[in-house]
Image (tube, grey):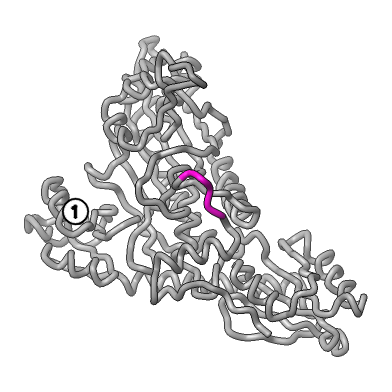
């Protein structure tokens, strides 16, 4: 007998489908404060696997790890006016300790530009110390009224990278290098065919000269900002009086970048790959890549013996779990299906009598038998490759099927109402952009460089830039 899950179908109610899925797949449970969550072992392992692989890429760029405080004085935030304006509605402050009112409120970090600015001022003296490349993996708080796990939390986990350079050219080049890294990581590891571009002036990170983004198109046609990299210029250097001595012995303000991805990436994975049965996970970050499900192992010691042989044989290469519980095989299949395990192996009395095992791949509707000795490292690699290829191709199909090229502003509302996103030629105009957002709820997620020149949809000017219009989480 197969256990039935209680996940609401995607086609019936997208919001309920999503919340059912994250809870039943054992990623999280809700915490007492709105917008926060208990990150359960299966979910946190997923985040840790992602973090580890991404951190390996940072190391290649000679980025070093640091850990900065959770709190800082409110007056530090007020030093960079544009930055304050961008974050004011989301900032949480601590005003009391016990019954004692603090002389000055303390800010719970919404991001750490001000802390890095302070650190750079205190620790940099000479151009010979540049570039300095730092990153931290932390939690942050930004108060949200409409929350959804991973997609929009009040508290979330992320990496926050900051670099400081002698020249604007070097800093801008590094911010673009991180942008490319995020795009490649999303595509190759997370199997998310993201769209890469630059934010408009009004959508930039507060205080940045340029913001580069990768956007994921989700199953419902909405976009999700999956990672950003910012060229900050020297504005934070001036705001925090960061001066270093140059080769000519003259003091100058250095140039900075900041960049980050968060647990929002997990939301992108869930909302792009998963189905009504549960999670579908990229194999490289899956907490469990292979689950070995035993049947009647308590009656036949040979069954568990063979399961352990598989784990010993492949456990150094793949993440393997043996499920030797007394649950029926149908219940086990459903449990590991909803958790998104790529490969499930079944070993029972009938299997070992034939020297075979039964296996299935998460996103395929089949079970197959194979000789026990044929299930080796190379065979597993081929199965995971097949699993991942199907995930990626499905995601590309979502991205491409949801796209509409258009030539008239009046079409935007119809496009986003139908669960699609639009791309059109665009010359920047903040007033027109704000008007579109107010009337349709769609924003320009990014500007994309085109190889072919076209006419802007609002001005008819010739341009090589195209804008991606979508509703977003």
Residue at the extreme front: 99
| Residue 208, horizontal then vertical, whole percent | 31, 35
| Residue 23, horizontal then vertical, whole percent | 55, 61
Q: Is residue 466 above or below residue 71?
A: below
Residue at the extreme top: 249
Q: Is residue 345 above or below residue 25?
A: below
| Residue 354, horizontal then vertical, whole percent | 85, 90
Q: Is residue 123 above or below residue 132?
A: above
Seen in the image, is 458 located left or right of residue 450? Answer: left
Residue at 56 percent of width and 70 percent of height: 388
What secondary structure is the stretch in magenta mostly built from?
A: loop
Q: Quadrant of residue 26?
A: bottom right
| Residue 92, horizontal then vertical, whole percent | 40, 32
Look at the numbered disc 1 and give the secondary structure of its residue.
helix
Q: Is residue 30 magenta?
A: yes
Identify residue for label 1.
437
Quarter of the figure with the N terminus: bottom right
Quarter of the figure with the C terminus: bottom left
Q: Quadrant of residue 316?
A: bottom right
Which residues fall within the magenta stretch?
Answer: 29-33
Q: Is residue 35 magenta?
A: no
User: Dot 1: within a 10 Å radius of its alpha carbon, few (fewer than 14), some, or many (20 or more) residues?
Assistant: some
Residue at 40 percent of width and 16 percent of height: 104
Residue at 82 percent of width and 82 percent of height: 348
Is residue 284 visible in the rendered image? The answer is no
Seen in the image, is 202 located left or right of residue 217? Answer: left
């Amino acid at each position: 007998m197969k256990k039935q899950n209680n996940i609401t179908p995607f086609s019936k109610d997208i919001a309920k489908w999503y919340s059912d899925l994250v809870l039943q797949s054992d990623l999280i449970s809700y915490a007492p404060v709105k917008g926060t969550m208990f990150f359960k072992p299966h979910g946190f392992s997923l985040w840790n696997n992602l973090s580890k692989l991404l951190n390996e890429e940072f190391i290649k760029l000679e980025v070093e790890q640091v850990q900065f405080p959770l709190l800082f004085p409110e007056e530090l935030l007020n030093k960079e006016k544009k930055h304050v304006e961008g974050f004011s509605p989301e900032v949480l402050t601590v005003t009391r300790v016990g019954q004692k009112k603090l002389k000055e409120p303390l800010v719970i970090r919404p991001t750490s530009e001000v802390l890095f600015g302070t650190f750079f001022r205190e620790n940099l003296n000479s151009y010979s110390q540049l570039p300095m490349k730092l990153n931290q993996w932390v939690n942050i708080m930004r108060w949200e009224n409409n929350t959804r796990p991973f997609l929009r939390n009040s508290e979330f986990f992320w990496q926050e990278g900051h670099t400081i350079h002698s020249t604007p050219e070097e800093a801008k080049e590094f911010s673009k290098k991180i942008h490319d890294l995020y795009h490649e990581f999303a595509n190759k590891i997370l199997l998310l065919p993201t769209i890469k571009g630059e934010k408009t002036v009004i959508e930039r990170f507060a205080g940045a000269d340029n913001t580069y983004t990768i956007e994921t198109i989700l199953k419902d046609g909405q976009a999700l900002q999956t990672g950003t990299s910012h060229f900050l210029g020297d504005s934070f250097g001036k705001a925090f009086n960061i001066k270093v001595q140059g080769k000519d012995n003259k003091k100058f303000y250095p140039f900075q970048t900041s960049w980050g991805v968060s647990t929002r990436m997990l939301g992108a994975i869930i909302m792009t790959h998963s189905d009504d049965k549960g999670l579908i996970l990229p194999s490289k970050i899956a907490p469990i890549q292979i689950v070995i499900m035993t049947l009647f192992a308590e009656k036949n010691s040979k069954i568990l013996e063979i399961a352990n042989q598989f784990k010993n044989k492949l456990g150094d290469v793949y993440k393997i779990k043996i499920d030797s519980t007394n649950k029926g095989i149908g219940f086990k299949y459903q449990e590991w299906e909803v958790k998104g395990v790529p490969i499930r192996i079944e070993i029972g009395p009938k299997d070992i009598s034939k020297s075979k095992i039964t296996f299935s791949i998460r996103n395929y509707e089949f079970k197959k038998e194979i000789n026990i000795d044929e299930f080796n490292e190379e065979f597993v690699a081929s199965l995971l490759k097949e699993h991942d290829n199907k995930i990626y191709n499905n995601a590309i199909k979502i991205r491409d099927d949801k796209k509409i090229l258009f030539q008239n502003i009046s079409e935007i509302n119809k496009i986003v109402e139908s669960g699609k996103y639009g791309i059109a030629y665009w010359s920047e105009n903040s007033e027109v952009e704000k008007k579109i957002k107010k009337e349709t709820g769609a924003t320009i997620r990014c500007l994309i460089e085109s190889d072919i020149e076209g006419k802007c949809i609002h001005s008819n000017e010739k341009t090589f830039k195209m804008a991606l219009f979508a509703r977003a989480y």
